[in-house]
Image (tube, rainbow, N blue to C red):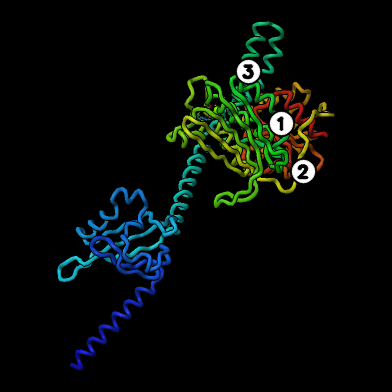
Amino acid sequence: MRRNDQKQRDLFESERNFKLLVEGVVDYALYMLDPSGVVTSWNSGGQRIKGYAATEIIGRHFSCFYTEADRANGKPLRALAIAREQGRYEEDGWRVRKDGTFFWASVIIDPIYEDGKLVGFAKITRDITERYEAQLRLQQMHDQLAESQRLDALGQLTGGVAHDFNNLLMIISGSLHTLRNVAGDAPKAARAVSAIDAAIRRGAALTGQLLTFARRQRVSPQAVNVTEQIEAMREVLDTGVGGAITLQFDIDPKLWLTIVDVAELKTALVNLVMNARDAMPGGGSITVAARNELLHEHALAGEFVSISVEDTGVGIAPDVLGKIFEPFFTTKPIGKGTGLGLSQVHGFAHQAGGTVRVRSDLGKGTRITILLPRNQQATPQAEETQAVGTIASGIVLLVEDNPDVAVASTCLLEQLGYTVRWVDSAEAALKEIERNEIDLVFSDIVMPGKMDGLGLARHLKTIRPGLPILLVSGYSDAAINAHGDFPILRKPYEIHQLSQAIANLSR
Ligand SMILES: Nc1ncnc2c1ncn2[C@@H]1O[C@H](COP(=O)(O)OP(=O)(O)OP(=O)(O)O)[C@@H](O)[C@H]1O
Ligand SMILES: [Mg+2]
């Protein structure tokens, strides 16, 4: 009898401990259901995670934890059936708290048998919303990284091709100038020359877009007031969109300054507005907006100037959306689009330390937003003005590793009245400067050998501080580093641009 008492007491004690344990667990909702799904016990974890007190929930059917859609689909009872048939039910999914908010839950349901008879279910629910969100964020970051790596690889490829192409254009345009002088005024020749000239310009514009995409465009970043730049472009854009489309501007007059290349900014804006126009063959409206924005995102945080172009056009299909920044991706008919507009926009924004965002609703319209980081220090600089004085004549040391380009450049320099000495490397240039009188160094930036054009320029600045140096480049990451230190002429250039660049050296 006494032993029985003891046993009873032990059992009671262990049950009490177990109850305390279950009730005390706050990270898990641990509770029981009867065979039909009605809640029969509750713990503090359940209260914490789902918001119900024991008195509120015991006696109610557990389907109230499910979303309306899940309830309508019969998911709660299906879960119990699976637990019964398979011995366990496990799932991660959305559940609903008492206050109606959702959380991402990890759920386990185990059937409980007594003497072979189902007496109910044990249910364990954990709130893993944070983990779920972290996973989502991670996935998004993975996707973004993969996307930017893909575009980077494409950039490498197109950048290389465009660089070679630029050199070809340089040779054609240099030689064309010579031909023009030789051909004189014969009308046929003049027509041919101007046709070639137009083709060179078009080729230069295309390679320019490609180089921007590859972020290898030689840029002249300066502190820019976007408000002023957009104002200055109103007329051009208005003419560009034509009569059937209304073009509106919504520009914050107090925009922060941002450091960009003005020419690239203008090209990007034209590209976006032309795309918007093309998306509205039946007419519609385009809104160009610009405002200051404070971003707190994981990938992008800080102060930005946002410039967006929004249209009421056809929109972009989801399967196309992932490709629009790729060079040569176009959905336009042959001759209509080259597929380089958004590539330029992408490269421009990223080179400036910003990014591009797209929002598009099929059939409703598209908004593309360029985000450019705010420039904290500088004040806006005036745009390049006409040259005042020139270095009229003298000896130019041409440093260029490509012989064909060297011939074309020599031609142009001679036409400007200079005597040209040509060397094919920075090392040879240094020797030449030791030996001979040189008035101006004109050097390509990208060159094989230990020292490139920029290295040469920096070296010369220390040993021959007064010697004017003009660098020339189709692209170069080095050129980007050089901005501010040395003037850089963009390839391909025409004779008046060369003349202007040399003139600017003496200012
Ligand atoms: N505002 C827009 N609305 C709908 N589709 C757009 C819009 N902007 C771009 N797209 C889509 O993205 C593609 C790529 O645009 P992108 O500007 O790079 O090249 P393109 O306009 O086709 O040619 P290019 O600009 O070189 O003349 C377009 O062909 C079009 O399918
Ligand atoms: Mg375009």
What is the CA distance from the residue labelled 1 to the residue labelled 2? 19 Å
**Amino acid type of the residue tagged 2 in the rendering:** Thr
Q: Nearer the viewer, residue 273 or 408?
A: 273
Q: Disc count in the image?
A: 3
Badge 1 element: helix
Q: Is mark 3 within 8 Å of ligand 1?
A: no
Residue underneath mark 2 = 379
Q: Nearer the viewer, mark 2 or mark 3?
A: 2
Residue underneath mark 1 = 231
Asked whether the residues under the numbered discs 1 and 2 touch, taking CB atoms below 8 Å apart as contact, a structural biologist would say no
Earlier sequence position, callout 1 versus callout 2: 1
Q: Nearer the viewer, residue 282 or 100?
A: 100
**Amino acid type of the residue tagged 3 in the rendering:** Ala
Please give the name of the residue rendered at 80% of the width and 28% of the height, measured from the top-left corner: 386
Mark 2 neighbour density, 10 Å: few (under 14) some (14–19) many (20 or more)? few
Residue sticking out furthest to the top: 187
Horizontally, residue 380 falls left or right of residue 142, namely right
Please give the name of the residue rendered at 69% of the width and 39% of the height, measured from the top-left corner: 252
**Amino acid type of the residue tagged 1 in the rendering:** Glu
Mark 3 neighbour density, 10 Å: few (under 14) some (14–19) many (20 or more)? few
On the image, the x and y values in percent for residue 319 come to 42, 35
Horizontally, residue 421 falls left or right of residue 74, namely right
* Label number found at residue 198: 3
Q: Quadrant of the C terminus?
A: top right
Q: Taking the image as drawn, is residue 134 in sight?
A: yes
What is the CA distance from the residue labelled 3 to the residue labelled 1? 29 Å
| Above/below status of 206 relative to 487 | above
Q: In terms of image quadrants, where is residue 447?
A: top right
Badge 2 element: loop
Residue sticking out furthest to the left: 116
